[in-house]
């Protein structure tokens, strides 16, 4: 009998909404901070902050879009009975 049983930790799933939200917040704050730093160096206060925030937002949108499409393709392949991971753009590996 163990006096102090080890607790099994559940692996964190970053595919959930909380993981996506944390990705978004972290990346936007990072890009906003980089824009602020560039504005301090160049002496143009809101210009780089706005540009970097927009760049980070577009990047996050594209990342989430492609991640969603990949997940939907994977689930569609499972639904059709295929167990191989789906390839983007229909490209297949030559054997």
Image: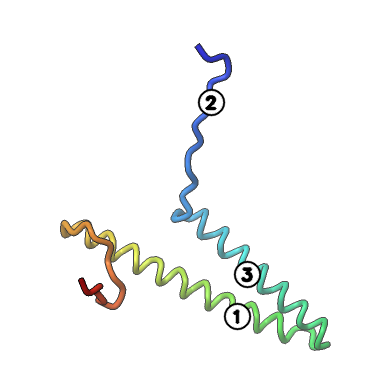
Crowding at dot 3, Cα within 10 Å, few <14 / some 14-19 / many 20+, comes out as: many
Spot occupied by residue 42 in the image (x, y as percentages of width and height): 80, 88
Q: Alpha-carbon distance for marks 3 and 2?
A: 38 Å
Decide if residue 34 is on the left or right side of residue 69. right
Location of the C terminus (image quadrant): bottom left
Look at the numbered discs 3 and 2 and tell me whether their residues touch, using CB distance below 8 Å: no
Q: Alpha-carbon distance for marks 2 and 1?
A: 46 Å
- Residue 70: image tag: none
Residue hosting label 3? 28
Spot occupied by residue 58 in the image (x, y as percentages of width and height): 53, 78
Spot occupied by residue 86 in the image (x, y as percentages of width and height): 27, 66
Crowding at dot 2, Cα within 10 Å, few <14 / some 14-19 / many 20+, comes out as: few
Tell me the mark number nearer the camera, choosing from 3 and 2: 2
N-term mark: 1 or 3: 3
Spot occupied by residue 59 in the image (x, y as percentages of width and height): 53, 76
Q: Residue at x 22, y 62 (%)?
A: 77
Residue hosting label 2? 6
Mark 2: secondary structure = loop
Above or below: residue 43 compared with residue 8? below
Furthest toward the front, the residue is 95
Decide if residue 60 is on the left or right side of residue 79. right
N-term mark: 3 or 2: 2
Q: Residue at x 34, y 62 (%)?
A: 71
N-term mark: 2 or 1: 2
Residue hosting label 1? 54
- Looking at the image, which is closer to me, 82 or 72? 82
- Looking at the image, which is closer to me, 43 or 77? 77
Mark 3: secondary structure = helix
């Amino acid at each position: 009998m163990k006096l102090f049983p080890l607790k099994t930790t559940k692996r964190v799933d970053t595919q959930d909404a909380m993981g996506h939200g944390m990705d978004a917040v972290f990346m936007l704050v990072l890009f906003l901070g980089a824009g602020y730093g560039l504005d301090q160096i160049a002496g143009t206060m809101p210009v780089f902050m706005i540009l970097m925030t927009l760049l980070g937002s577009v990047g996050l949108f594209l990342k989430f879009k492609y991640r969603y499409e990949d997940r939907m393709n994977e689930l569609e392949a499972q639904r059709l009975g295929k167990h191989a991971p789906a390839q983007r753009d229909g490209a297949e590996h030559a054997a």
